[in-house]
Amino acid sequence: MSVATPYTEKTDEQKAICEMVHQFADEQILPNAEHYDHEDSFPEPIVAQMRELGLFGVTIPEEYGGMGLDLTTYAMIVEELSRGWISISGIVNTHFIGSYLLMKFGTEEQKQRYLPQMATGELRAAFSLSEPECGSDVQAIKATAKKTDDGDYEINGQKMWVTNGLLSGLVFVLVKTDPSAEPKYKGMTCFIAEKEPGVSENTGKYAGFIVPPKIKKLGYKGVESTELVFDGYRCPAENILGGEEAGLGRGFIQMMDALEVGRVNVAARGVGIAQRALELALRYSQERKTFGKQIAQHQAIQFKLADMATQLEAARLMTIRAARLKDAGERSELEAGMAKLFASETGRFCVEESFRIHGGYGYSKEYEIERLYRDAPLLLIGEGTSEIQRMVIGRKLLQRHKI
């Protein structure tokens, strides 16, 4: 007679970490998110505590001062942070993608130079693909880098929608180094652009790196989203990701690889905001009474709760599967695209259903669901829109099942 092993979706270590971050969200993020959202100000005290908890170095190897944990555990942490406030997870997200790029493609010198400071959160990173005239069509970027007589590269152009654009000290930026390359993606290179954190117009060795005032947004407040302007900015050849010999013309491939983990990250954020929306709906529906009973006793409300919980559970499982595939070293662009598409749409769906359950109070800033209602749409856009995800999924399906 076979003996069934107990089912668990988390290891003991993952449980302990998730419980810690869950408590952190309950005690530090949720009570303060409304203030920072209203002021649209950077939550420095919360970020300082995240540094103390080591959350900026979760996936960075121990030899560089990080925790050395896998993408799956990181996705679980992001879910818990996003349950508190997706802006907090955004501060970690771009930093995480920067560290991923360094760990996978960086030279040993680049890793030694940046990763120890990134692990502590002392040095924070951002990454930049989009431009004012292109988002999803990455191959249409116009920013350029040309080699100078002294061996440096001069970067010129504009970038858009850079999370942590002002306060980061490093920006992993994709530019064209060979505008005549065919296909176009072979003429793109990723540079590790250094700058002074918090400075709008850099001078000295960072001259030509300008960060215009942050973009005003519907939601996703507290964390800054900015343009970047490169005007004669000089970047040494050694700051090409992977080094000049191995990294020149490889930027597009590097960035697309990073987007796979980025999409898992956004999926986890969708799960987190959906989880919080369900919690708020369950609480409010048992507190609010109409026609002599809790609204939770009405079948119409129960159907909404059932659909929310079911989609949430499916989104969580898809996200973890995509993360585990990546951890196993397998190609996961299809699964990551599916997870990002489904989980971000689930986040929007659960937030809207919770908003409806709250009725008129959902429209009031006195209730948390109002903030979630403004935050959720970001996930439908960031790291590739839902429409782009469907294109990726369709293309990869046909590649895998070619007849």
Image (cartoon, helix red, strand yellow):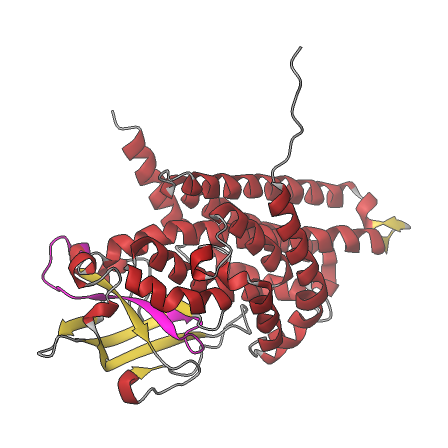
Q: Nearer the viewer, residue 373 or 76?
A: 76
Position of residue 354 in the picture relative to residue 216 (left or right):
right
Residue 249 forms part of the magenta stretch: no
Residue 24: image location, x then y, percent: 67, 62
Q: Nearer the viewer, residue 116 or 188?
A: 116
Q: Quadrant of the N terminus?
A: top right
Q: Quadrant of the C terminus?
A: top left
- Number of marks drawn: 0
- Toward the top, the furthest residue is 1
Whether residue 234 is situated above or below residue 55 in the rendered picture = below
Position of residue 133 in the picture relative to residue 363 (left or right):
left
Whether residue 41 is situated above or below residue 97 in the rendered picture = below
Q: Kindly identify the residue that appears in the image at 72 percent across and 56 percent down.
A: 280
Can residue 208 be seen here? The reply is no
- Toward the right, the furthest residue is 292
**Residue 373, located in which quarter of the rendered image?**
bottom right
Position of residue 97 in the picture relative to residue 241 (left or right):
right
Residue 246: image location, x then y, percent: 19, 56
Q: Kindly identify the residue that appears in the image at 78 percent across and 54 percent down.
A: 283
Q: Kindly identify the residue that appears in the image at 62 percent across and 62 percent down.
A: 372
Position of residue 305 in the picture relative to residue 82 (left or right):
right
Residue 172 forms part of the magenta stretch: yes
Can residue 372 be seen here? The reply is yes
Q: Nearer the viewer, residue 282 or 126?
A: 126
Residue 176: image location, x then y, percent: 19, 65
Q: Kindly identify the residue that appears in the image at 51 percent across and 55 percent down.
A: 67
The magenta-colored residue range is 161-185
**Residue 114, located in which quarter of the rendered image?**
bottom left
Residue 399: image location, x then y, percent: 28, 34
